[in-house]
Image (spheres, rainbow, N blue to C red):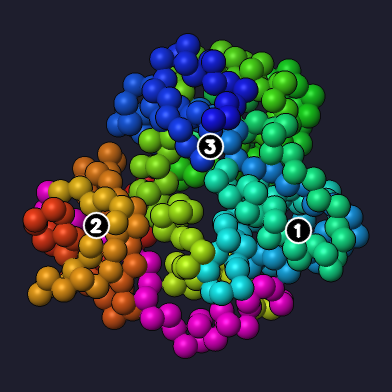
Amino acid sequence: MKNTALTQTHEKLGAKMVPFAGYNMPVSYEGVNVEHETVRNGVGVFDVSHMGEFLISGPNALDLIQKVTSNDASKLTIGRAQYSCLPNETGGIVDDLIVYKIKEEQYLLVVNASNIEKDWEHISKYNADFKADMRNLSEDYSLLAIQGPKAVEAMQSLTSIDLSAIKFYHFEVADFAGIEYVIISATGYTGSGGFEIYCKNSEVQQVWDKVFEAGTDFGIKPIGLAARDTLRLEMGYCLYGNDINDETSPIEAGLGWITKFTKDFVNSEALEKEKNKGPERRLIGFELDERGIPRHDYDIVDGQGKKIGVVTSGTMSPSLGKGIGLGYVPAVFSETGSKIHIQIRKNSVPATVVKLPFYKG
């Protein structure tokens, strides 16, 4: 089990630690509802240093990225980031990721912790044709997500740049918390604004300490992975391994917006056919009409009790006070307002298909 550079800090803070993607990670400190509320209304900090970082450089860096990712990275300018995915050859998804354009001919790819080796091998396989310079920086870099509506105000004293000027999915390489160069990225997995800070492992303790010092008057708190999950689910954000995987296509997962057929990429021809024809099943968001909590792998059934799909993510929404979830159903059941049922143990609980996100802010 690997540790992040901050593992001892979390343990001292009394975090409940659990194994996650091969790392010893804090799942909660005070409890998921309190931590969820902190991020929705104030500012909270996640240690997500288990994520992977690949640096792709050289004259053919963009060509390689264009081949392996679904989105159009040629649209990126320096200081911009882009959500994308790595399609596989059989209609599924190797991983979802964020692509950062650091400078001309240099990109940072940020991938999911559980897929670091798989992604590296997949991209390397295609790089045989492009010969871009690939460096796996995952073991050397830490990542803090400082999230919530008070994040900008709470962190402004730590940097010489104007944090409020960094637009969503833009970033700056600048001074922060006494460190000369970090990536300050206006991204996150919560839907409540804020930043993600990339720095070296040797620098992250200083950054963590100064972040909490600066945020004292704003009620800043450390937040665990459990609240990260409820926050992302309220926004309808996909979680790799649950809502998307090697067997789900970006089209049926509702990721057509990051799948650009203006270029040639892995399996693009088959995915374009699927898009034009319309997928046979779709990922939907649903809210329970009665009390209950939907969970991963629960059956989705029709009015007669016949299984039509499966729940991929589910929880009791702390913001809405009702059961919410994501799952795959045949396209005919995917329209907003459609009535379905979730099989919760012996009970068939009625639910309604809703438009995402669940949480409107």
Image point 10% across, 75% down: which residue? 304
Q: Give neighbour class at mark 3: few <14, some 14-19, many 20+ (Cα, 10 Å).
A: few
Q: Residue under circle 3?
A: 22
Q: Residue under circle 2?
A: 298
The x and y percentages for residue 92 are 53, 69
Image point 40% across, 42% down: which residue? 229
Q: Residue furthest front?
A: 1
The amino acid at mark 3 is Gly
Distance between the Cα atoms at labels 2 and 3? Answer: 26 Å
Q: Give neighbour class at mark 1: few <14, some 14-19, many 20+ (Cα, 10 Å).
A: some
Horizontal side, residue 183 vs residue 3: left or right:
right
- Judged from the image, the secondary structure of the residue bearing numbered disc 2 is loop
Q: Which of 279 and 103 is in front in this view?
A: 279
Horizontal side, residue 227 vs residue 126: left or right:
left
In this rendering, the answer to whether 223 lies above or below 320 is above
Horizontal side, residue 43 vs residue 285: left or right:
right
- Judged from the image, the secondary structure of the residue bearing numbered disc 3 is loop
Q: Residue under circle 1?
A: 124
Image point 55% across, 64% down: which residue? 93
The x and y percentages for residue 154 are 55, 23
Specify which label sits upstream in the sequence, 2 or 3. Answer: 3
Part of the protein shown in magenta: 263-291
Closest to the camera, between mark 2 and mark 3, is 3
- Judged from the image, the secondary structure of the residue bearing numbered disc 1 is helix
Specify which label sits upstream in the sequence, 1 or 2. Answer: 1
